[in-house]
Amino acid sequence: MKKLYTTAKIAIVLMAVVFVASKSNAQVSNHFKTVWDGENGQDHMNFMVISAILEDLPLTVGDEIAVFSGTNCVGASKLAKAINPTDNTTYLKISASRGDGANDGFVEGADIIIKIWDVESQKEFVAKSVNYRSDISSWLTTGKFTSGATSVVEIVSYEEFTQKISLIKGNNLLSAYLAPGNPNVSAVMKALVDNGYLTKMTDETGKSFSLVRNVGWVNNIGNIEKTEGYLLAIATNCTLDIIGRKVKLPLDIPLKSGWNYISFPKTVAENAMTVIQQLIDQNKLVKVQDESGNSIENLKRLGGWKNGIGNFEPGKSYKVNVNADGILTIK
């Protein structure tokens, strides 16, 4: 996330004002219960949340934030108003208590785990990204519990899903409706490589992820792109699991004149002609093919445009030939 304050002067003002002003925004948590509930606790560590984002939106009134040491909730607060990064009166203060060996607080030096309770969806989320601010040298940035310390944090979270894509021996055209947390091809394909299932992966430009003798697997593709499809050569029937966030729709897929491997980032099948009709209307479509060679093409006097593919399916990619650069929008 972008830093909200860039000068030492602003940082000092932030530190001086925030711990007093924020008290009005912290309410007793209803969902999260600390292991030291009902007591004052001891040897506290203080947290100040100055930004909290869930699914690209700021947390709202009634949402809760908690800090965990292992499986133990050691501090929690509920928002009385939404956190506004530019208004220090909205920052959320959380106090965490150190334990005395009876699982009643944090373990000194343990990893800090931050969780969110979304009151609207009634779901818990683990913070996927925590930015520990370092505007002031005394602020702790290690991500470890430390008695008496203060950490000022910006947190981001989101829900992740798993897409299981069935692959058969031979060539497969692949795409996903999820954007993996680590989009590097080497990471996404690791399970297939480790199990000996992947022979080669190629993008529409001919760049590959392949095994080079005396070198190992070489990634010339880079990252998986949400607009793109990929050709996978598979040694035996298998399943690829992709974990990530759902691709946001509508999605504009840029097309270059000639053949393109397009993604189909939807969770349900859709009639292929419905998806591709916009290119027909623009007089740009030449032909579409799936991985089996079925096609959509104009038979002209023999019946016009014919759909030999049927539906576009989640997990699949399609080859699209256009006579000019254009945009295909997946809605």
Image (tube, grey):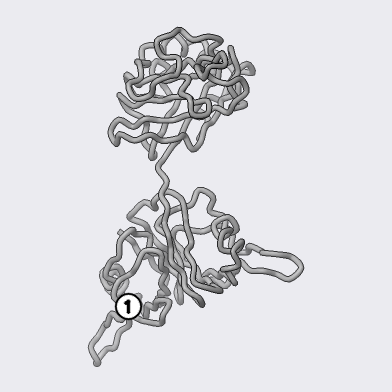
Vertical comparison of 35 with 71: above or below: above
Q: Nearer the viewer, residue 191 or 149?
A: 191
Q: Secondary structure at mark 1?
A: loop
Vertical comparison of 301 with 22: above or below: below
Quadrant of image for the C terminus: bottom left
Vertical comparison of 159 with 115: above or below: below
Would you name the residue on which mark 1 appears? 309
| Amino acid on which disc 1 is placed | Ile
The residue sitting at 36% across, 30% down in the picture is: 117
* Image coords of residue 287 (percent x, y): 37, 80
- In the picture as drawn, the residue positioned furthest to the front comes out as 102
* Image coords of residue 269 (percent x, y): 30, 65
* Image coords of residue 75 (percent x, y): 46, 19
Q: Quadrant of residue 100?
A: top right
The residue sitting at 47% across, 58% down in the picture is: 241
Q: Quadrant of residue 136?
A: top right
In-image side of 139 versus 56 (left or right): right
The residue sitting at 52% across, 32% down in the picture is: 130
